[in-house]
Image (cartoon, rainbow, N blue to C red):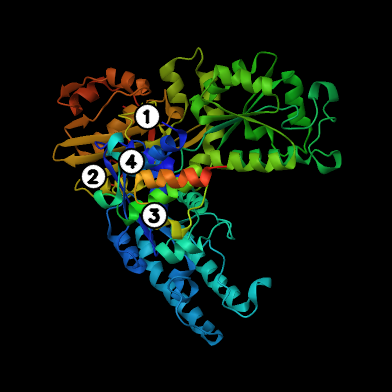
Amino acid sequence: MRLLDALRILRQVEAELPPWPVFFACGFTPLHLETLLTAELQQRVPAGKIVVQTGLYGDLLGNLGRMAASDSALGAVVLEWADLDPRLGLRRGGYWTGADLAGIGAEIEAFLARAEPPLLAAASRFPVAVALPSLPFPLLAPLGPRAVSPFQADVELALAAWRQRLVAGGCWLTPAQAAGDGAADPAAQIEFDFPYTLPHAARLATALAAALAPPPAKKGLITDLDHTLWSGILGDDGLDGVQWDLDHRARAHGVYQQLLHALAQEGVLVATASKNDPRLVAEAFARRSDLILRADDIFPMVAGWQPKSEQIAEILRAWNIGPDAVVFVDDNPFELEEVSRAYPQIECIRFQPQPRALVQLWRDLRERFARAGVGEEDRLRSASLRGAERAAQAAQGADPEEFLRSLGAELQFEHSARDDERALELLNKTNQFNLNGLRLAAADFRRYLAQAGAFVQTTGYTDKFGPLGKISVLLGRCCGEVVEVDFWAMSCRAFARRIEFASLRQLFDTTGAAVVRLGYCKTDRNQPLAEFLQSLPLASEGDRLCLSREAFLARCPVLPHAITAAAPAARAVHAHD
Amino acid sequence: MPMIETKLLECFQAVFPSMPEAKLRAAVMADLAQWDSLATITLATVVQETFALEIEPEDLPQLTSFQSIAEYLRRRTAT
């Protein structure tokens, strides 16, 4: 990003937007890095006005403490060598000799020890990104530039151990930015105490903003087969003629399969869209045991002679996710264009087997599907979709009540005031069954739960087709006999199982409430939630929809679920009525 | 308006967003409270970025008004 563009972005921000406070701590003059970082974050958080606080100039340790005590939504920290010891910088270098190296090493260790607690304290409350020194290492040791000196090796070892502790403590460490002549601006460092060239400051700002405010991860990847997943054309070359290994100069396809296999294991939905005989494709996945991407990793496996956009339509229906959450990979520009025209929101990426393009593809896909961790629900996702399909097929023609009873469904409710990563993920990623579409940052989630009477109720589900994991989250506040429900989201994989009714029943039972007031707001995508609410005897009261326990129970259908792990205050067992 | 003045005006608008165009073209550091040391550094950086040149530190003291900067840029970019 150019500085001029950053200034323009900041000029255009509406003053009425809610403030989004960010603490930026560094030991030098923030200057252009602050401007670029603010603009980068503003682009990523358009619903708020980024307001950056930098603390006191020259007091990095004090600023880390101020950051830890602040009410910030995000924290960004940039360290340079001079922060670890002033003798490592140009501007505040002072007098030193070779005999001082041991003392400088001790000073660095002391600085790191002092900086760690406030950093970890801040990271326990809101996302904090840290950029470690990216300027060339100062050549204090007599060895000069020709090799790494013992002094430099010791400093880097101390920094590496510190970095490991920061990562374990929840800080986001930005990837190492290439040091070298392109990073440092000695004139600006001496004149203004701003050590970076503009391009390097821009790179740092982008890295910090990407760590702090990443875009939502994509959910599904649709891949072509011929000349993409494998080298060759299945229909022409036969089952044994398609390749993906070094011996056949097709290693790039093997690397691609490996990445897709890893993504599938991490919960990314992977499907195929191929112009091929579907029986041949099924046979390939059944007979080629050397395939790295397995049949189990793929759902659904679509192949045929219809346009790819129609194949993708079939996949989107099976997945029940929006096209904006999907990436399509194909080697054929024609296919990419056809899909792109039908689905402008799908990100279309061309597969090219050349090594440089392959590495870029790996990076692009890892970026699109990046997530902080892989939970049990992620691993269950593909299997649960298959289970849902089997359930849907079993339900065809069956009596609905008998079918629901036959599922052997179990619900696991948890009702607490503890923050829950999966609950927050559900709230922020679910669109269709979502009470109002409001999103919560991690710090806001914790602040919400800190209120008197606040709670989070989550629901896990299992039936004979397999587990779905935690699929519903409800955030509310108990106010005497009334419960205010401020957030409610349920995964679309849980539809048609009356889990929404069971969640409300559990809420009434656990809290003892006489009335539940729902903070509903119509969005572009929460029609499924709206349809559910229309089935309830609700009364409008201001901006809330009210539901009394009596009215709910009179309308509640038979709930066939067994409750296996009720909340502490709930009844122990509650079979269907 | 010649291209140099047009691009220079964009730089000034980015650094002093609330000032009207006529005032910017007549801007003089000594008369503008907003034109402090931070604005000087930011303006110099934006000008360097926009015109793809490096301003020598010894040239900075003469760049104290819109017109003086425009004149400086005309000299630097003349072929």
- Name the side, left or right, on which B47 lies relative to A47: right
Residue at the farthest bottom position: A99
- How many angstroms separate mark 4 from mark 3 (CA)? 51 Å
Q: Which residue is mark 2?
A: A454
Q: Nearer the viewer, mark 3 or mark 2?
A: 3
Residue holding disc 3? B62
Residue beneath the point at 56% across and 85% down: A98
Choose the circle earlier in sequence order: 2 or 1. Answer: 2
Asked if labels 1 and 3 touch by Cβ distance under 8 angstroms, the answer is no
Question: In front of the other: label 4 or label 3?
Answer: 3
Q: Which residue is mark 1?
A: A499
Q: Which mark is residue A551?
A: none
* Protein chain holding label 3: B
Which of label 1 and label 4 is nearer to you? 4
Q: Separation of disc 1 and disc 4 at Cα?
A: 23 Å
Badge 4 crowding class, 10 Å Cα cut-off, few under 14, some 14 to 19, many 20 or more, is some
Q: Amino acid at mark 2?
A: Ala
Chain at numbered mark 1: A
The answer to which of marks 1 and 4 sits earlier in the sequence is 4
The residue where tag 4 is placed is: A440
Secondary structure, mark 3, is helix
**Residue A291 coordinates in the image, percent (x, y):** 75, 37
